[in-house]
Amino acid sequence: MPLYLQSIGFSVFFIGLLEGVAEAVAGLSKGYFGQWSDRVGRREPFVQWGYGLSALSKPLLAVLATPAWVLLARTLDRLGKGLRTGARDALLSDETTPADRGKVFGFHRSMDTLGAVLGPLAALGWLAAHPGQYRPLFLWAFVPGVVAIGITFALRERRAVPSGRPVVPFWASFRYWRQAPLAYRRVVGGLLAFALFNSSDAFLLLLARQRGLSAPTVIGLYVLYNLTYVLSAWPLGHLADRLGPRRLLVGGLLVFAGVYGGVALAHDLWAFGLLFALYGLYAAATEGVGKAWVSTLCAKPDTGAALGTFAGLSSLVALGASTGAGLLWQYYGPGATFGLAAAVALGVAAYLARVRVVSQAGGSAGPAS
């Protein structure tokens, strides 16, 4: 995506703004549709329609290359993500126990990321044979999207108990935050502080390209990142069940700080390869594990709202993160963008290591929970 946008004349700042706006749309919708799924006690329809909208957005990117049209297509894609995320994560949580929640969310992230390996590999093959021909890739991406939608109709969900709460207006969809347990707000607050400085992965790819690596090589680095994620998400989720999600999250943030601190200095392919592999370990140790931890900090009937609010607020702060990263890059260079994010990651890791929380699923309080 970032390479395609650059090829049609988008600046680094506008790419950051586009990604931020798209994530903000996803953010506003995640909390809303998450608490809606709690209200009706259903998850399937939200998952199906959400993946459907995202699949539809792909061929639209190939139709026109104007900024307004690209923004529309990306917004439709992120709206689909917002529609499905809270319900999908609640569906996963409904089918787990506290003892295996990390494994389940880790396995989901692993399988989700496997697609992010196969897709770029296919794109790599296409671009090797047809350099610079990005638009046909978005047409081909519609095919697996349709297959995925078909598979969702095989779901047989265990109906959740309806929350009974009215669905609040779209603009008030994060009202759950005010009624959430203190432990939820403490943990999610720390994760949001980190997300405010964790810009889009597009900036890592743009930096590698700026340092002289070819477009196929940059895509290869992205494949390496996702492949590392695929191979490590499930075992790290299993480790989180044994050691506790807090330790995995803190360790992942420390790895992130090392990667962002190192990437600002990297110039050689081997250095970028090592850093992208470590970046995959960071993602595997935080994304699914974070959701697993958050799902234990809320009452069971509120799982969709809790996870949707967390994911939604994360997407909203991504607007500031990506836009701010683009501005820092433009005026102070990539070193400022990545150095500041590394420093914030260290601070949040220290906070999460000491914050006191009590699990709503019966976990213990204190730094070891």
Image (tube, helix red, strand yellow):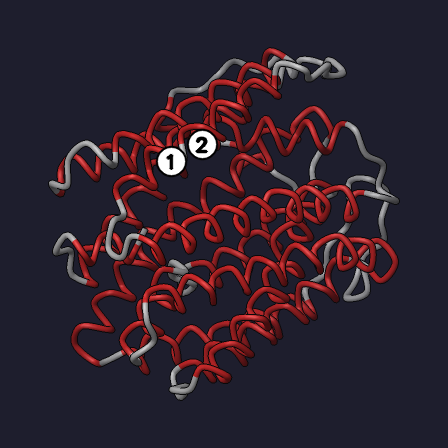
Q: Quadrant of residue 255?
A: bottom right
Can you tell which mark lies on residue 82? 2
**Residue 10 occupies quadrant:** bottom left
Please state the total of marks drawn on the protein image. 2
Residue in view at x 30 percent, y 49 percent? 19
Mark 1 closeness class: few <14, some 14–19, many ≥20 residues within 10 Å: many
Q: Position of residue 365 (x, y in %)?
A: 81, 56
Whether residue 343 is visible here, answered yes or no, is no
- Asked whether 162 or 15 is in front, the reply is 15
Q: Which residue is mark 1?
A: 78
For label 1, the SS is helix
Q: Where does the image place residue 230, in percent across and percent down from the top left?
A: 65, 54
Is residue 236 shown left or right of residue 362?
left
User: Please, what is the three-letter code of the amino acid marked with disc 2?
Assistant: Gly
User: Nearest the camera: 194 or 128?
Assistant: 128
Amino acid residing under circle 1: Arg
**For the residues bearing labels 1 and 2, Cβ distance under 8 angstroms:** yes
- Residue 340 at least partly seen: yes
Q: CA distance from mark 1 to mark 2?
A: 6 Å
Q: Seen in the image, is 4 located left or right of residue 318?
A: left
Residue at point 24%, 72% (across, down):
328
